[in-house]
Structures are given as structure tokens and as C-alpha cells.
Amino acid sequence: MGLSLVLLSVCIAVAAAMLFLAMPRVGTPGPLTLFLRFAAVSGVAAVGSSAMYFIHGAGGGRLTLAFGDVAMVSAPALLAVALCVLAGRGVRRAAVAALTLATTVGVVSLMIPLPASLAVKALGLTVACAACTAVVLLGRPQPAGPLRLIATVTGAYAVFSAARVVVAGVAGWDSPLYAAAFSFGPTTVVGALAVLLIGAAVVRVRFGPRADAPRTERSGGSVVVVGDWELASAAFGPRRLRQLVEDLRLAARDLDPTAADVPRGVEIGVPDPVAVLAARLQEAYGWTAEDTILLDGDALAPPAPTTHRARRRTPATRD
């Protein structure tokens, strides 16, 4: 009993560590940065689960199997948290749910022998992957293109995991049908393909344009910038100030997909741009009322050149 408790504690600690690697930035500005942080830990968990399964197959014992199951379920669960960040709601609740799900799977894997624990893990994957799909379909986070790909892949994997349990329950874990479609080999191939597609989608979120709307020539708009640059730089520091500019540009494209970057700010074609952007930044990007005082705008901008392609995300320059 004592050894089981020790193993259980280690399993819970692994799940918590993977989650809280990403948690410190919750509530701070920069949703895209936080999304990428959760997505990166999700990818590490997916790769780590494969490593644990190979060690288990080489005689690593039940503990490595439990670690592998925790990591495997944590991967889509943390991805669901990342998607909640872009959707702008339920991040902390999703994080707690991810930890609870991973811990439950770890407890079952330590306490209950195969194949029952395998069925619980498959059901956990079904829930986590379905949650990813639901967040994208219901929350409609941006950018739509790569996130639709994530929703499609996770939805397909949710169906695959559910089918794995159904086939095992109807035909048996040792049946030829289960061996052909859902044994270690096929599931590894399907899982690897899912990880690659999701990874490609995350890269598109990071480096691609954040809006699917075609870019058209602008007839001019209002320029909103982070004003009092020298004073703000002394008060906030250059890194923090660049983050504010980045948030401003992201918020502008939430409201106007054709918004164009200008030095220290953005050109946007909406009425009362300073007030509208201030409200959006407070709602979705964690800005305080004091932060929004820095916004300066209502200047008519010249038409943006047609060769300029407004990007959804401009990487921050390192200090």
C-alpha cells in the first residue's frame, strides 16, 4: 500500500508539473504567447508519452505505463487549454479540468491492470480531443484556418479513440479486428500523424496571417499608437512596451481583419477606434485601465501601399 501511494504521488506530480509549466502566464497580456506556451507543453507531453511506452515495452514496469498514459492524455487536454486562451474564456477552468483528467487516468493506470486501464485512457483521450473540437466550433477563435485543422484532427482522433473502446468491448481486445485497426502499431501511426498535423497548424498560427479575409487596398483609416513612448518605456521597460504594441495590433485585427501595422501601433478602419480598441484590449488581452491611457489616435492615415501585407502577428524583438 505504501509503494502504491508513492507511485500515485509521483504520477500526480508529473501531471501537475506539465500543467504548471504553462500556468504562470495565465492572466497576463499576450494570448498568442500563452497559446504557444500551452501548445509547446502539449507537444512535449505527446512525444514523452511515446518514449514512456517504448520503455514500458522493454520491461519498464507499470510506473512507466502510468507516466505514458498521463502524458498522452495531457497532450490533447493541454491543447484544449491553449485553444481556450485564443477563444478568450474558461482558461483556468480548462486547466483544472486537464489536471483532473490526467490525474484520474494516472490513478487508474497504477491501480487497475490492463486492459481495463487502457479503456479508461482511450475514453480520457476521447474527452480531451472532443473538448478541443468543441472549443474551436463554439468559441470560434482566430485564426480560423489553422484552428479548423486542429478541430478536424482532434475530432477525428476522438472518434478513433471511442471506436477503439467500442470495438474492444464488442469484438474483444484479442480480436483480429482490434489487432488490425487499434493495436499498438496502428494507434502509433495515427497518433504520430495527428501530432504532425497539429504541429503544422500551430506553426501556421505562430507565423501565418491571423485573418482569412482577402487584403484589399485601403482608402485610409485611423491610426492608433502607444503614445508617450519615452515616458512609457522608462516606466514599463522596452520589452513590456513591445508586448503592448503587439497586443494592440492583435486586438485591431480582431475588429478589422484588414488593419495594417504602423510604427508603434496600427491603422484601423472602425469608428471611435481608441475607445473600441481599449475595450477589446481590456476584455481579451488583460489590459488595465491604466494601460489603455497610453493609447493615442484619431489621426487620419494615408492609404496603405498595396504592396504592404498586414501580418496578424509581428514577433517581438529580443532585448
Image: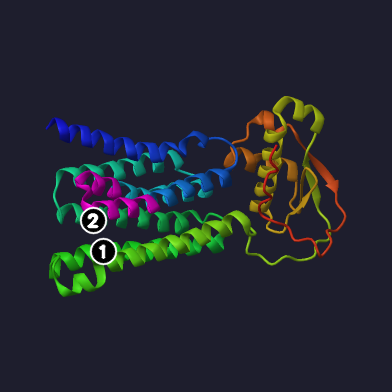
Query: What count of labels does the image hold?
Result: 2
At a point 39% along the width and 41% down the height, the residue shown is 18
* Magenta stretch: dominant secondary structure: helix
In this picture, residue 13 sits left or right of residue 110:
right
- Amino acid found under the numbered disc labelled 2: Gly
Task: Give coordinates of residue 231: x percent, y percent.
Answer: 79, 27
Residues in magenta?
A: 46-69
Residue 3 in picture, x, y percent from top left: 16, 33
Q: Which mark is residue 98?
A: none
* 126, 317: nearer the viewer: 317
Residue type pointed to by label 1: Phe
Q: Is residue 47 magenta?
A: yes
Camera-nearest label, 2 or 1: 2
The percent position of residue 184, horizontal first and vertical second, equals: 26, 64
Q: What label sits on residue 57 in the rendered view?
A: 2
Question: What is the secondary structure assignment of the residue under circle 1?
Answer: helix
The residue positioned farthest toward the front in the image shown: 58
Q: Nearer the viewer, residue 174 or 287?
A: 174
Where residue 81 sits in the image (x, y, percent)? 44, 46
Q: In the drawing, does residue 185 fall left or right of residue 263?
A: left
Which quadrant is home to the N terminus?
A: top left
Say if mark 2 contacts mark 1, CB within 8 Å.
yes
Please tell me which of labels 2 and 1 falls first in the chain. Answer: 2
**Residue at mark 1:** 184
- Residue 294's quadrant in the figure? top right
Could you give the CA–CA distance between mark 2 and mark 1, rounded to whole angstroms?
10 Å
